[in-house]
Image (cartoon, rainbow, N blue to C red):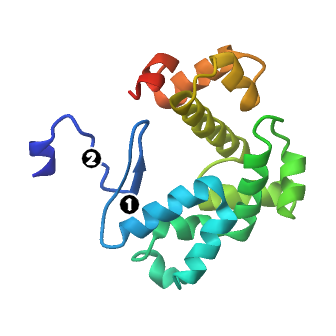
Amino acid sequence: MFRQRYPNVTLDESRMIVNSTRFTTAGAALAHVDLALRIIRGRSPALAALVARYLLVETRSSQAEFVIPDHLAHADPMVERFECWARRRLAQGFSLAEAASAAGTSERTLARRLQSVLGKTPLSYFQDLRVEHAVHLLRTGSASVDQVAAQVGYSDGVPLRTLLRRKLGRGVRELRRGG
């Protein structure tokens, strides 16, 4: 029925939270909690974990299918430490050795854990965080592409433009317009 009513909208039934360039949507009984935790985690993974504890969200696998699966997937302490480190270092660049040290583990263990929890390599997730932050800066500010690129760790706007086009399928003008 949804697809018939909204043929221009891509419906992804496989995920509770879906991020697009303009919107983040959530579905299901407790999806509003999942959405709130996703927004909080974007600023502070540690705060999202604290909020989840106050909400009495348990990390038992038996609840993972029913209660805020997105947060539970990111509630891994090693992944949280990596994400905090990465968000603080977007402008400085990526070093797997430094990331592993900050997460309190070996490079190989960090890579395996991120792959199992997020389905990504540490570098790929780091780039996703760069893109996320760059999109936010482009939409909410008036800085030039070169200035935004510097804030997320690129020497100029060329690699950022390429990455935005490759990952999002949109250019800077579209993102600034909210498209």
Residue 45 location, quadrant: bottom right
- Whether residue 136 sits left or right of residue 176 in the image: it is right
Number of residues whose C-alpha sits closer than 10 Å to that of mark 1, classed few (under 14), some (14–19) or many (20 or more): some
The structure residue drawn at horizontal position 70% and vertical position 61%, both measured from the top left corner, is 79
- Give the SS element for disc 1: loop
Q: Hey, what amino acid is under mark 1?
A: Met
Q: Position of residue 90 (x, y in %)?
A: 75, 39
- Give the SS element for disc 2: loop
Q: Nearer the viewer, residue 148 or 57?
A: 148
The structure residue drawn at horizontal position 41% and vertical position 56%, both measured from the top left corner, is 17
State how far apart marks 2 and 1 are (Cα): 11 Å
Residue under circle 1? 16
Residue 32 location, quadrant: bottom left
The structure residue drawn at horizontal position 52% and vertical position 59%, both measured from the top left corner, is 38
Q: Nearer the viewer, residue 130 or 111?
A: 130
Q: Is residue 87 above or below residue 113?
A: above
The structure residue drawn at horizontal position 75% and vertical position 25%, both measured from the top left corner, is 150
Residue 5 location, quadrant: top left
Give the label on residue 11, or none.
2
Q: Hey, what amino acid is under mark 2?
A: Leu
Q: Is residue 38 above or below residue 141?
A: below
- Whether residue 103 sits left or right of residue 25 in the image: it is right
Numbered label tally: 2
Q: Nearer the viewer, residue 90 or 148?
A: 148
Number of residues whose C-alpha sits closer than 10 Å to that of mark 2, classed few (under 14), some (14–19) or many (20 or more): few
Farthest front residue in view: 142
- Whether residue 60 sits left or right of residue 153 in the image: it is left
Give the label on residue 107, or none.
none
Callouts 2 and 1 close, C-beta under 8 Å = no
Q: Position of residue 178 (x, y in %)?
A: 41, 29
